[in-house]
Amino acid sequence: MMLNQSEDHVLVELYRSGNERALEVLIRRHQKRIFLQIYSKVQDQDVADDLFQETFIKIIKSLRKSNYEEKGKFLPWALRIANNTTLDYFRRETRKKEVRSTGEYTVFDTYGESDRPLEANWIEAQINEDLRKLIEYLPEEQRKVLHLRMFCEYSFKDIAEETGVSINTALGRMRYAISNIQKLMAQHNISLEQ
């Protein structure tokens, strides 16, 4: 059997049974799409290269631990890992900047950064933290649709396929999620104004 012509789920099973070449084919097949997904967010070749490597390390670990359930969706699953890896990178960078804001910084830390006042950055970070907390109050199906749409940048067609519902149901869940977030913001006196 020609590995290059095998479907993703066949390659996954071959890799799990010890065929390292099957993983090479999977990586080669999807590397461009996954790399471009990462690069579009970080806009830095070196950082994107590092995050791409980190993504595939996570993919390999998940496949070895059998954390991947085959639903014919290897690429969307891999793109979610890439998105989560990228989000983790931005969180790490944000924490580094927060540590530096305590007074431990050099002239190089501010090189190339925007001229936004530090207070505006703190307010934005607080708003984002408040929103993350509010999202946890949503029902599971709304939370999942919101996560796939906002953080993984899935289309509603992809969300419908991933969650096993119609596109209209996915759209409805997103509308309810936004409505519920707005109600929660009013209840907790949270504003998106800076």
Image (cartoon, rainbow, N blue to C red):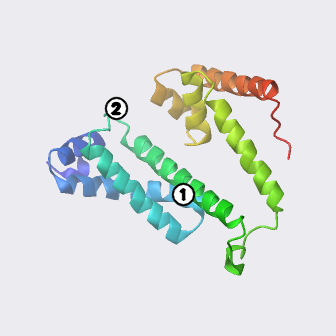
Q: Position of residue 36 (x, y in %)?
A: 51, 58
- Most extreme residue toward the right is 193
Residue 182, percent from left and from top: 77, 27
Q: What x and y, as percent, mark residue 16? A: 20, 44
**Is 56 in front, or is 61?**
61
Give the residue drawn at x 64%, y 58%: 94
Name the residue rendered at 64%, 31% in the picture. Answer: 135
Q: Nearer the viewer, residue 147 or 126?
A: 126
> Residue at the spot x=47%, y=29% of the render?
161
Q: Which residue is mark 1?
A: 89
Q: Can residue 155 be seen from the camera position used here?
A: no
Q: Secondary structure at mark 2?
A: loop
Can you identify the residue that label 2 sits on? 71
Where is residue 185? Give x, y as percent.
Answer: 77, 29
Identity of the residue furthest to the bottom in this view: 107
Q: Disc 1 versus disc 2: distance between alpha carbons?
A: 28 Å
Q: Amino acid at mark 1?
A: Tyr
Is residue 118 something one can see in this rendering?
Answer: yes
Amino acid found under the numbered disc labelled 2: Lys
